[in-house]
Image (tube, rainbow, N blue to C red):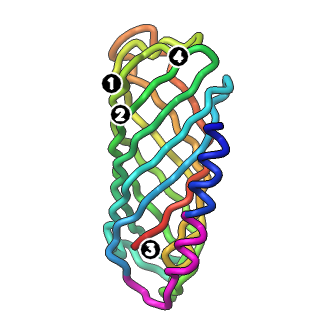
Amino acid sequence: MKKILWILTVSLLICCSSAAAQEKSEYSGFGLTLGYGESQDNIDIYRVGLAKKWNVRWLQSSIGYVDGYFELSYNHWDGKDDEINAVALSPVFLYAFNPNGKQWYPYIEGGIGVALLDEYRIDDRNLASSFQFEDRIGAGFRFNNLDLNIRYLHYSNASIEEPNHGIDIWLGTLAWYF
């Protein structure tokens, strides 16, 4: 049932953003993000967030430029026997392959943020603390105000507490900027 609701939510977001897509180059910079993924040990990850683009063009070249965004997210991890709820805040650097300022472009991204978990055990994993670092790398495609990406996330407490099993996640995300 959760997956059906998640698919309906994403479908609604796609329909709304397609209807709202306009030929304008600047939006407010705020975006709603929805994501679904899975860890290497089959823990389902559901994510909803609010992103704020920096709207900068650092190191602009004939290939593209560096930009970025902040993302505040709520994450729900659904394991076989356990669940975790988490809140994360991440600054993310993005390299946009967009030298001409077009409305559509591919990009790569990376960042390190922090997360607070309500539990630190899920199934057979012991993350040892509620405080975790959220490392990410990813790639995506932006079209007008719609953003689609795939990213790899790693949560770990950097061995502040032991044992530090960490967790690796592949996550697909859809964002709508307004």
Query: How far is the residue under mark 3 from the one under mark 4?
Result: 39 Å
The picture places residue 159, in percent across and down from the top left corner, at 39, 17
Mark found first going from the N terminus, 1 or 4: 4
How many numbered marks appear? 4
Residue 95 image point, x, y percent:
48, 66
Badge 3 or badge 2: first in the primary sequence: 3
Please tell me which of labels 3 and 1 falls first in the chain. 3
Ranked by sequence position, the earlier of labels 3 and 4 is: 3
Displayed quadrant of residue 123: top right
Would you name the residue on which mark 3 appears?
65
In the shown orientation, is residue 6 left or right of residue 30? right
Please identify the quarter of the rendering in which residue 148 is found.
Answer: bottom right
Q: Which residue is mark 1?
A: 131
Q: Disc 3 versus disc 1: distance between alpha carbons?
A: 33 Å
Which residue type does callout 3 highlight?
Tyr
Residue under numbered circle 2: 115
Tag shown at residue 122: 4
Q: Residue at x 50, y 57 (%)?
A: 109
Amino acid type of the residue that numbered disc 4 sits on in the rendered structure: Ile
**Res 103 label:** none
